Each structure stands twice: as structure tokens, then as C-alpha cells.
Amino acid sequence: AQSVTQPDIHITVSEGASLELRCNYSYGATPYLFWYVQSPGQGLQLLLKYFSGDTLVQGIKGFEAEFKRSQSSFNLRKPSVHWSDAAEYFCAVGAGNNDMRFGAGTRLTVKP
Amino acid sequence: GAGVSQTPSNKVTEKGKYVELRCDPISGHTALYWYRQSLGQGPEFLIYFQGTGAADDSGLPNDRFFAVRPEGSVSTLKIQRTERGDSAVYLCASSQSYQDEQFFGPGTRLTVL
């Protein structure tokens, strides 16, 4: 069965600094990988997804993620964080769009 | 038009009571999903509908939980004999078809006293 580990429960970065959120997965086949963001009172929003092809995936809001099969990782990055990026971020793995298993999430705080 | 909506936004009930949570998916979306998100956790899959039928209900924790989608649009998640451990945010998502991106609603926060 697939599973996801997000090692960092909470991360604090300064506005304008770079960001990397870690995600490690366990899955027996080629995974579908996702990053979602959840702001207070808002539904989960898809940032980006990887199915196949180029291992560096570009998403919305300036986010990108890189699939590294050898490390079973799909880390999320952003070169310069904005205060509006403060939210909870979830990594998910699945056999497809209809079969996602989520990690426990990483809460991002942005310092002014 | 609008996104996925869920009602009520908050529900407080007493242990042992019955509750119904409603999800209105995006118009035209054939696939609908229910998740449960406990405090400090990611969403946990409960059940997935394709049209009117439950294509995968493997995530329902026990037989107190049941969901329906009689006309292939609105869905209701029903919880019988609620327990304090059922307290969580219940999320609904829909997608145009089972292979497409899921769009999530804001959730219903259920509190069982």
C-alpha cells in the first residue's frame, strides 16, 4: 500500500527566502505524486502533480517539485516565499487521480 | 459555475446521535470523493463515487458510516451512533471523471460531544 511521509511538521521562513518542503513516499509501482495547499477556511488546492515525463514539475504560484525515484522523494520548492504562502502543505501519492493517500502535512509560517 | 460546496460548515452533536453531511459537487462532475481529516493529519480517503454508485468504499471505517449519491450529483455522508472519535473535518471533492483533478470543498467540521 502507498504511504507518504512529510518529516517536517512545521517550518518557518522569512519572506523572500527560499523554501523546500520534504516529501518521501512508499509505493510499489510508478507513483502519481501531488502537492496540495490548504489555507484556513479554504479547500485543498492542487499546486502541482507528477505522472510521468520530466521529473521537474512546475506548478501554480511559483512552486515547483522534483521527482527523485532513487530517493523516493518529491520535494516542493519555491525560490522566494511571499507572506500569502503561509498555509498547510500536503504531499500525496497514488495510483491515479482517484486513489490518493496524503501525508500528515507541513505547516508553513512566513516571518515578515 | 461555483466550486464544491458542503453543508453545514460546522456540526456539533452528542455521542450516539445520527448526522448527515451534504456535498454539492461542481456541476457536471461525475466523480465524487469523501475524505476525513483529523486534527494534525492529512485527509484520509473514505469513499469514491462514479455516478450514482460507490466505486470504492474501502476507506469507510465501519458500518456506522454510509454515503449515498442517488442522482449522481449531491452526496450525503451519514454517520450513525456517533462517537467522540468521529470528530474531524469531513472533506468532499469532485472531478470531471475519475482520471481528472479533484477539486475540494471547504469541509464540514464535525464535533461529537
Image: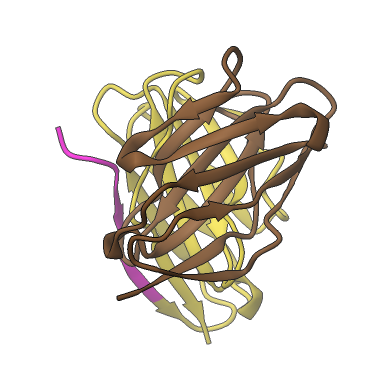
Chain colours: A brown, B yellow
Quadrant of residue A8 within the rendered picture = bottom right
Q: Is residue B96 left or right of residue B59?
A: left
Q: Is residue B90 left or right of residue B11?
A: right
Quadrant of residue B37 within the rendered picture = bottom right
Image position of B17 with respect to A8: above or below: below
Q: Nearer the viewer, residue A43 or B55?
A: A43
Please report the bounds of the magenta region as a residue range: B1-11
Quadrant of residue A100 within the rendered picture = top right
Task: For residue A35, say whether it is visible.
Answer: yes
Q: Quadrant of the N terminus of chain B?
A: top left
**Residue at horizontal 41 percent and vertical 60 percent from the top:** A17
**Residue at horizontal 57 percent and vertical 71 percent from the top:** A10
Image position of B74 with respect to A38: above or below: above
Residue A110 lies in magenta, yes or no?
no
Q: Nearer the viewer, residue B94 or A43?
A: A43
Image position of A92 with respect to B21: above or below: above
Residue B8 lies in magenta, yes or no?
yes
Q: Point out the residue furthest to the top here.
A: A53
Marker count (numbered): 0
User: What is the x, y in percent for residue B38?
Assistant: 58, 67
Q: Point out the residue furthest to the bottom here.
A: B113
Q: Nearer the viewer, residue A46 or B47?
A: A46
User: What is the x, y in percent for residue B31?
Assistant: 44, 26
User: What is the x, y in percent for residue B3?
Assistant: 24, 40
User: What is the x, y in percent for residue A2?
Assistant: 78, 38
Task: For residue B56, say whether it is visible.
Answer: no
Q: Is residue A67 left or right of residue B13?
A: right
